[in-house]
Amino acid sequence: MEKTIKTKRKSLSKELQFRIFNRDGWLCCWCKKPVIFPPVMKFLELELRNAGNEQPLAYYHGHWTRDGAPLLDELGAVIDHVEAFSKGGPCTEENLCTACCKCNGRKSSALLEKWTGREKRRPVKGKYGEPQHWDGLSLLFVVLAKRNLDALTSGEREWLVALSH
Ligand SMILES: [Zn+2]
């Protein structure tokens, strides 16, 4: 395991991000809500367009705005640093976790001690246990992306490769 603390932010590989989402069961590590793999929403919208629907849809927006993509504004999956990167937290797998867009926005670069002491979303607890098979709709992304290969951006192509392993 690498011990050096990186001083420059390195973009995380999609394989690593996918591994962490899977490790965490696609649940936000802070509030335990199920998260959604964001690109899938774009392809759900595309499917509806392809089926001839022309009315405005708020499935996907590039900036996950509440008006344009309310589901992503709440539950879009992001990788969070347990100990903030700006405070020296390393980019190791143990210091990375799955977060929903809302918790990620609230935590921002707060120190972990401050964050855990602050008011945050109350963790969800299931009466019948935690979901064991939630996948953030990532498998649906693979199916829909393969059906619309011409519409993929280079980043989405990389996601498709990472998710197909
Ligand atoms: Zn959350």
Image: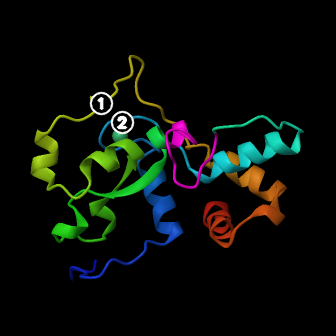
Magenta-highlighted residues: 59-72
Query: Which residue is located at x 22 percent, y 59 percent?
Result: 109
Foreground residue among 9 and 139: 9
Q: Is residue 126 above or below residue 51?
A: above
Which quadrant would the C terminus be assigned to in this image? Answer: bottom right
Say which residue label 2 marks: 32
Q: Which mark is residue 49?
A: none
Query: Which residue is located at x 43 percent, y 57 percent?
Result: 20
Amino acid type for the residue under numbered disc 2 = Lys
Disc 2 to disc 1, C-alpha distance: 5 Å
Question: At which x and y percent is residue 51?
Answer: 88, 39
| Residue 133 can be seen, yes or no | no
Numbered marks: total: 2
Say which residue label 1 marks: 123
Which quadrant would the N terminus be assigned to in this image? Answer: bottom left
Query: Which residue is located at x 10 percent, y 48 percent?
Result: 114
Display colour scheme: rainbow
Question: At which x and y percent is residue 145?
Answer: 75, 56
